[in-house]
Image (cartoon, grey):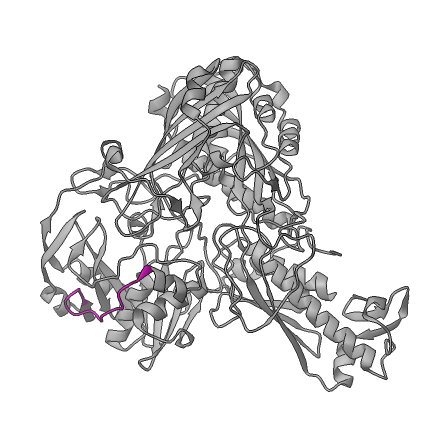
């Protein structure tokens, strides 16, 4: 693939709009005669409503309607198989719980009513006036107590096996010369993107609905809204041009449906914006885990067995759980491997995907560090000894893999040779200094996507796709790809996305967007370029008349004969001579690799596969890998841990934009830093409500917590995932980070903390 600006650190094409405030987010599409909604939420964790008195709220100033299960519009009951078909297989609601349809309460904070008023303040005030009587059922909220009663699901995400038994791990561990076995725990973490969830619902008549919604999947949101509201999909339009962070929580929750119900009742546009407190209860979270890992090896460090037993929780409203054993399926060669997941049902809200769900890799990478310490082997060397040259379970080659190069590059850039294997040997005044590292990994997915590109006679180009930019730079890399493939300056290209009326694209989750949408941009631009070439070849007035396509080059909005730039024809002149005010191409790029891929449902031509691509996903295993390195300073008197510097090296295929890619990894590292040192959701066991209810209580990293973060990329294209060769990198940056920090804390202090977060009380 010939490139000019792909890979370069091009500034975001939407940067000026964002810094000037011109980029509009969901809550900013204010409408004429718009009303405001505020929910009534349950104050028990399990039970049912016996009476709900809305009389005082209905009399309050400005109130237009109060919706409860007694009077709310009826919604279509969810059949999981039907709704998956309705959204094209891309996703289902975060929880199978239709809002305000019955009197059942499943968790504290559940939506049980909705007040719609003239102003936000009036709606919020009136919501406090609703009086609710309950019958309480017993609460089940303690994972440690309930794990023995859990069930063992066979799969997660609908396709990923989570119960693995290869060989005989128990016997291998029992007979091994060297073995370790430890339990590691991680806390419940909550989503807090910069932009909380928000929706504005606008009805046109009784059968057409527009939702301005903060969503990671405009097509999925369209499908779910159409399904539960009994509308034709084409009569629902979801608009989300800018999203202030997603990370998994802005999947398909029911706040847009509540907004639509409120707007339907009052016959006016309605805005429903969640508070920070609601982000702790109503938009999912990463479930807590208890992970017991055993590693067995010979005296040289060669692994003979890995056993990884995972306990976590879910609710009765979803099939999702935190699959924390997934990295153990792909990391390290061992002839015996056992991975299990046991899932308990708890009354503390529904877990959901959260950046790199299941892949955080704290337990396995901590255990590898413990084994290295026991064997007195350098942690990097131990990982190289056990490097998996092929997928250890599937027994097939990696599509592209440079993990050892990540280790080497990271060790050099970080200065790993300054590390002393013996803990407590480095000090700077009152601070103990430690060095730690861990492996990063995340699967590489690709789905089908459709793109339409339109060129006008003045040379302007518009790229259209119903994908989303959740803050990652999708606008920019789509523009870069089209600019390269058409030979048009990036300044002449606009990108339209975040609108369900545009051509089909997958949800922005699982790090799929770059691998899915960018090949479609490339394929469509190539079709349009060849249409221009054929027009020039057939045009008697063109200097390219009679030539063959393979004889023609392109750049600077012109076509020209290879080796003779004087024989050229500009796109604009060519189109005007042929009475074309506009030319357009639409192409679906089908996936050629990966697992769980959606099919072609767009009425556009399908791009051909390259011969070296793997169309059946049985020849190669698609994963990205990386290495994380942390330096910490630990205050021996106070137990406070500071990460003083961090180095991340990633192998994610071709880099589309060095600046936005680096920003993605920096964000992922900060995510992992929060998990390592401060993020934990605590629940009141009497009521099952989170007592860490705001950002004053639920701590996330701020500027002073974040050290210098150096990011490096291997940058070698994956030849099998697509013609672009790029894999997604939104999530891999956070994997292994917490383990690297915990391992560095051990190197600094000699104390092995196996329970996240690493708060001062645990070190003291």
Q: Position of residue 341 (x, y in %)?
A: 36, 37
On the image, which quarter does residue 544 sit in? Answer: bottom right
Q: Position of residue 712 (x, y in %)?
A: 63, 38
Query: Going by the image, does 325 lie left or right of 299?
Result: left
Between 744 and 135, which is closer to the camera in this rendering? 135
On the image, which quarter does residue 269 sit in? Answer: bottom left
**Residue 430, relative to residue 291: is it above or below?**
above
Q: Which quarter of the rendered picture does the N terminus lie within?
A: bottom right
The residue depicted at 39 percent of the width and 64 percent of the height is: 27
Residue 72, magenta (yes or no) = yes
Q: Position of residue 339 (x, y in %)?
A: 41, 33
Query: Going by the image, does 600 lie left or right of 477?
Result: left
The residue depicted at 66 percent of the width and 71 percent of the height is: 461
Residue 366, magenta (yes or no) = no
Label tally: 0
Between 371 and 455, which is closer to the camera in this rendering? 371
**Residue 198, relative to residue 503: is it above or below?**
above
Between 49 and 338, which is closer to the camera in this rendering? 338
Query: Magenta residues?
Result: 67-80
Q: Tell me which secondary structure the magenta stretch mostly adopts.
A: loop
Q: Is residue 378 visible?
A: yes
Q: Position of residue 206 (x, y in %)?
A: 31, 80
Q: Is residue 423 visible?
A: no
On the image, which quarter does residue 321 sit in? Answer: top left
Q: Which quarter of the rendered picture does the C terminus lie within?
A: top left
For this orientation, the residue located farthest to the bottom is 579
For this orientation, the residue located farthest to the front is 167
């Amino acid at each position: 693939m010939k490139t000019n600006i792909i890979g370069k650190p091009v500034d975001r094409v939407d940067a000026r709009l964002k810094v000037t405030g011109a980029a509009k987010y969901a809550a900013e599409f204010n409408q004429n005669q718009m009303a405001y909604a505020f929910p009534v939420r349950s104050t028990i964790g399990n039970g049912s409503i016996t009476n709900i008195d809305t009389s005082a709220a209905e009399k309050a100033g400005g109130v237009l309607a109060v919706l409860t299960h007694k009077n709310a519009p009826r919604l279509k009951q969810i059949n999981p198989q039907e709704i998956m078909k309705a959204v094209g297989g891309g996703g289902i609601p975060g929880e199978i719980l239709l809002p305000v349809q019955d009197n059942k309460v499943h968790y504290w904070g559940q939506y049980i009513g909705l007040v719609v008023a003239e102003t936000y303040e009036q709606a919020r005030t009136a919501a406090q006036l609703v009086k609710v009587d309950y019958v309480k059922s017993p609460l089940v909220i303690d994972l440690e107590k309930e794990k023995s009663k859990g069930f063992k699901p066979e799969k997660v995400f609908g396709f990923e096996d989570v119960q693995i038994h290869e060989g005989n791990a128990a016997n291998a561990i029992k007979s091994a010369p060297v073995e370790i076995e430890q339990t590691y725990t991680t806390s419940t973490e909550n989503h807090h993107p910069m932009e909380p969830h928000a929706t504005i619902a606008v009805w046109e008549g009784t059968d057409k609905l527009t939702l301005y919604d903060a969503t990671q999947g405009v097509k999925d949101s369209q499908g779910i809204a159409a399904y539960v509201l009994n509308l034709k999909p084409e009569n629902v339009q979801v608009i989300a041009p800018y999203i202030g962070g997603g990370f998994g929580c802005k999947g398909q929750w029911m706040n847009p449906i509540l907004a639509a119900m409120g707007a339907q009742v009052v016959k006016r546009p309605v805005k429903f914006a969640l508070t920070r407190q609601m982000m702790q209860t109503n938009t999912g979270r990463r479930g807590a885990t208890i992970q017991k890992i055993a590693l067995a090896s010979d005296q040289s460090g060669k692994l003979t067995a890995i056993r990884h037993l995972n306990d976590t929780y879910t609710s009765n409203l979803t099939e999702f759980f935190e699959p924390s054993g997934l990295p153990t399926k792909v990391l390290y060669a061992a002839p015996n491997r056992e991975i299990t997941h046991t899932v308990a049902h708890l009354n503390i809200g529904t877990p959901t995907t959260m950046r790199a769900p299941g892949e955080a890799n704290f337990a396995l990478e901590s255990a590898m560090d413990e084994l290295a310490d026991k064997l007195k082997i350098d942690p990097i060397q131990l990982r190289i000894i056990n490097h998996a040259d092929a997928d250890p379970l599937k027994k097939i080659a990696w599509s592209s893999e440079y993990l050892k190069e990540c280790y080497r590059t990271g060790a050099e850039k970080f200065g790993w040779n300054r590390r002393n294997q013996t803990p407590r040997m480095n000090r700077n005044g009152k601070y103990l200094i430690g060095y730690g590292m861990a492996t990063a990994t995340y699967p590489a997915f690709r789905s089908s996507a459709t793109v339409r590109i339109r060129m006008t006679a003045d040379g302007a180009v518009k790229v259209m796709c119903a994908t989303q930019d959740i803050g990652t730079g999708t606008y920019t890399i789509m523009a870069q790809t089209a600019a390269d493939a058409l030979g048009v300056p990036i300044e002449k290209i606009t990108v339209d996305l975040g609108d369900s009326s545009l051509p089909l694209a997958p949800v922005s989750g699982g790090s799929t967007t770059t691998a899915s949408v960018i090949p479609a941009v490339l394929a469509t631009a190539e079709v349009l370029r060849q249409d221009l070439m054929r027009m020039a070849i057939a045009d008697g007035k063109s200097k390219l008349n009679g030539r063959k396509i393979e004889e023609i080059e392109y750049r600077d909005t012109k076509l020209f004969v290879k080796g003779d730039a004087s024989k050229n024809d500009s796109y604009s002149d060519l189109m005007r001579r042929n009475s074309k005010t506009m030319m357009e191409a639409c192409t679906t790029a089908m996936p050629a690799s990966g697992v769980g891929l959606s099919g072609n449902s767009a009425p556009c031509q399908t791009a051909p596969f390259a011969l070296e691509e793997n169309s059946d996903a049985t020849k190669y295993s698609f994963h990205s890998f990386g290495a994380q390195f942390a330096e910490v300073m630990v205050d021996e008197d106070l137990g406070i841990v500071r990460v003083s510097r961090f180095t991340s090296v990633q192998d994610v295929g071709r880099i589309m934009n060095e600046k936005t890619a680096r920003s993605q990894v920096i964000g992922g590292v900060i995510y992992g830093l929060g998990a390592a040192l401060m993020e934990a959701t605590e629940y009141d066991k009497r009521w099952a409500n989170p007592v860490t209810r705001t950002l004053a209580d639920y701590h996330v990293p701020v500027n002073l917590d974040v050290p210098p973060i150096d990011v490096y990329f291997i940058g070698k294209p994956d030849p099998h995932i697509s013609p672009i060769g790029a894999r997604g990198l939104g999530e891999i940056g956070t994997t292994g980070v917490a383990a690297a920090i915990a391992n560095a804390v051990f190197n600094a202090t000699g104390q092995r903390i196996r329970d996240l977060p690493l708060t001062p009380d645990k070190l003291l």
